[in-house]
Each structure stands twice: as structure tokens, then as C-alpha cells.
Image (spheres, grey):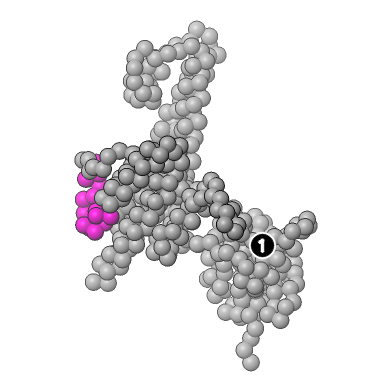
């Protein structure tokens, strides 16, 4: 007799996991709480029966994908689901770990949950490094703001024209002196923090380049191919690959745009159509890179020495896609600007279309890498 499939709902926390099981005949019951440890999970799976008849799920969160990898290694089919897309009953005001686990098991059995992409260990490691560098850039910006506002508040004005944070600017800040010892100590501390953040960013960017050298061939090809696009340098390309993983897992460019959260929200009924701001219900890191790169398409199409160097070794097909992106996106930018649209909205729209070209280049680069490895 064929054994019935059982659906497990796991409400995962740092130290504990609340477990519930939904049987195919309709019964949903709580199995209590276990420790969030590998041995406890292994004992639970052994107790519930053959691993191939179990279907587990838990919400994506701060505990990461360690539990997913462990369950997969034990032979259990596991899904990590998007927390914001878990159905919620109107009027349900009672929330406990036991009830959350039971709801996950019930919804998993009904097929009402949306699974997220789970990277392998190497892809997750690269993504951690890329996001650490992004956090370092944010810390660097805050440190610079603190120093610049301190200088402004104390009446210091640089005696030359030019941009801030250049070599002359930093040399000027270093030679400043304050009569009040407290202000001088403040200047030294803020200056030290700015220099420390700059060194940290530089160190992490070098670490990213070293990590790319150890990456799989297919990932290297995608990173090289994406750099053929204007506005997408090495760090941006690595960030895109780290956040997207295998780009061909998206069925089309529109699906990738939706994944980024850069598509407009909509509230339409009958003959009325109403579209609002972008949903932002997607990968914010991916959306940030696409919109930052979109600013470069306000310039006329062209291939300068830096972009030409990045395109060395890239296939002609990918170069053609990159040139088509320049032509189309610049035209799109100018058309929206002539219509009087807000510049931020224009760049967001251009960034959304840029994701379509990113998808096209990524798919072709992955296909080319597979063909090379097969040959």
C-alpha cells in the first residue's frame, strides 16, 4: 500500500522550531517544539517516517537556509516560502508559534504558498560578501555625512573649487586645526572613521574580485557578459549574479522585472484602470543596481575606452544586445523627459526595461557556458 504524503509546517526561530503536520486525509495537528539543532531535526525526520514521503516548509527569515540544506540532505523535499505571501484570514488576531506552524502545514498541503529561490552554499557565500560590501558603502556614506556636517557647523569652507572626498579635499581636512581641544578630537575621530570606512570598502571589493576568480565557469561568463552593458561595472555585475543566481530560472524578462519589485502597482476594476507607484515587493538589492545603472542611459549612445575594455572577450551577440540597450533606453529616457515626467520616475522606468536586457544577456551567457563545458 502506498504511504500517504505528510506536509510539515516549521515555525523556525534561533533556538526552537515549532512543528505541525498536515495529513492528506485532512487532519492538522501540532507536534510540539524541538530545539533548532541538527540532531533534533534528524530525530524528528526519523520519527515521522520515510523522508521521501515528507514535504516540509518554513518561512524565509534571519535563520537563513541552513535548515533547508539539512532537510534536503536527509532526503526531505523542502520549500522556503515568502512570509509576506502567506495567506492571512481576516479577523485572525491570535498568533502563536504553534498556530503559525499549523497554518504553514495547512497552506503547504493546499498549495497556497509561494516558494523563494534558495541558493547553494557557494552562491550564498558570495551573496553574503556582496551584501557586506553594500553595508560598508552605507556606513561610509554615514561617516562622510557626519564629518561634512561637522565642518559645516563649525564654519569650515574649503578654499578651492571641486568635489568633496577627492585627494585634495581629504588633504585639506587633515591639515585643519581647531582651537578648542574637544573640537579637534571630534575632527580626528570623524576623519579616522571616514578613512577606516574607505579602507574597509576597498578591502571588501578586493575580496569580491578574488571570490569571482574561484566562482564556477558559468557564473564568470554571466559576470563578464553583464559588464558589456553601460552602467554595469564589475561590482554591479557580481551583485546582480549573486542576487539572481541562475538567470535562466526566470521564464522571461517580465518575470525578472516583477521579481525586482520595479513594476507599477495597479488597482483596476471594470473600465477603470489606475496604476500607482512601483510595488517594491521584490529584491531591493537588484532594484537598486538596475536603477543606479539606468542613470547612465541619459547620455548619448557610445562606447568609450572603459566600456570597450569591459567588452573584450565578450561574444558579438552579447555586444549587440548591449548596444541595442543603449539605443532603446536612451530613446526611452529622452521621450519621457520631453513629456515632462519626473526624472526619478524616468530612471525607474528605464531601470525596469534594463532588467529585460540583463535577462537576455544572462540567459545567452549561461547557454554559451553550458555549450563550452559540453564541448
Q: Main secondary structure of the magenta part?
A: helix
Q: Is residue 278 visible?
A: yes
Residue drawn at x 49%, y 29% as measured from the top left: 143
Counting from the top left corner in percent of width and height, residue 351 is at 41, 47
Near-viewer residue (218 or 33): 218
**Boundaries of the magenta span:** 306-322
User: Which quadrant holds residue 61?
Assistant: bottom right
Residue 2 coordinates in the image, percent (x, y): 62, 89
Tag 1, which secondary structure? Answer: loop
Q: Farthest top residue?
A: 179
Which residue occupies 42% across, 28% down? 195
Residue 265: where, in percent of width, then height? 55, 51
Report which residue position mark 1 lands on. Answer: 87
Do we see residue 185 in this rendering?
A: no
As drawn, 55 above or below 359: below
Image quarter hosting the N terminus = bottom right
Amino acid at each position: 500500500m502506498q504511504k500517504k504524503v505528510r506536509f510539515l509546517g516549521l515555525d523556525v526561530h534561533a533556538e526552537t522550531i515549532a512543528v505541525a503536520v498536515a495529513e492528506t486525509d485532512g487532519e492538522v495537528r501540532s507536534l510540539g517544539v524541538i530545539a533548532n539543532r541538527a540532531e533534533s531535526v534528524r530525530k524528528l525526520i526519523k520519527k515521522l517516517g520515510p523522508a521521501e514521503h515528507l514535504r516540509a516548509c518554513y518561512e524565509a527569515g534571519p535563520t537563513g537556509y541552513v535548515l533547508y540544506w539539512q532537510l534536503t540532505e536527509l532526503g526531505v523535499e523542502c520549500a522556503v516560502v515568502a512570509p509576506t505571501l502567506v495567506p492571512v484570514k481576516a479577523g485572525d488576531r491570535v498568533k502563536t508559534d504553534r498556530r503559525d506552524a499549523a497554518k504553514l502545514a495547512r497552506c503547504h498541503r493546499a498549495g497556497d504558498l509561494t516558494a523563494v529561490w534558495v541558493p547553494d552554499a557557494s552562491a550564498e557565500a558570495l551573496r553574503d560578501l556582496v551584501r557586506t560590501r553594500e553595508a560598508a558603502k552605507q556606513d561610509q556614506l554615514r561617516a562622510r555625512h557626519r564629518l561634512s556636517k561637522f565642518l559645516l557647523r563649525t564654519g569650515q569652507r574649503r578654499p578651492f573649487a571641486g568635489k568633496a572626498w577627492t585627494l585634495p579635499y581629504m588633504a585639506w581636512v587633515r591639515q585643519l586645526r581647531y582651537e578648542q581641544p574637544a573640537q579637534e578630537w571630534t575632527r580626528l575621530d570623524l576623519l579616522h572613521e571616514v578613512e577606516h570606512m574607505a579602507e574597509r570598502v576597498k578591502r571588501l571589493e578586493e575580496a569580491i574580485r578574488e571570490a569571482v576568480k574561484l566562482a564556477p565557469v558559468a557564473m564568470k561568463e554571466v559576470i563578464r557578459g553583464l559588464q558589456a552593458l553601460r552602467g554595469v561595472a564589475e561590482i554591479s555585475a557580481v551583485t546582480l549574479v549573486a542576487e539572481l543566481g541562475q538567470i535562466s530560472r526566470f521564464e522571461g524578462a517580465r518575470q525578472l522585472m516583477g521579481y525586482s519589485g520595479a513594476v507599477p502597482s495597479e488597482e483596476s476594476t471594470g473600465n477603470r484602470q489606475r496604476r500607482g507607484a512601483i510595488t517594491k515587493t521584490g529584491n531591493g538589492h537588484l532594484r537598486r543596481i538596475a536603477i543606479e545603472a539606468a542613470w547612465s542611459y541619459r547620455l548619448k549612445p557610445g562606447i568609450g575606452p572603459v566600456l570597450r575594455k569591459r567588452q573584450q572577450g565578450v561574444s558579438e551577440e552579447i555586444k549587440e544586445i548591449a548596444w541595442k540597450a543603449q539605443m532603446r533606453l536612451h530613446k526611452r529616457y529622452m521621450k519621457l523627459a520631453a513629456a515632462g515626467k519626473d526624472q526619478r520616475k524616468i530612471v525607474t522606468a528605464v531601470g525596469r526595461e534594463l532588467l529585460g536586457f540583463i535577462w537576455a544577456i544572462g540567459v545567452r551567457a549561461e547557454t554559451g557556458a553550458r555549450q563550452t563545458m559540453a564541448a
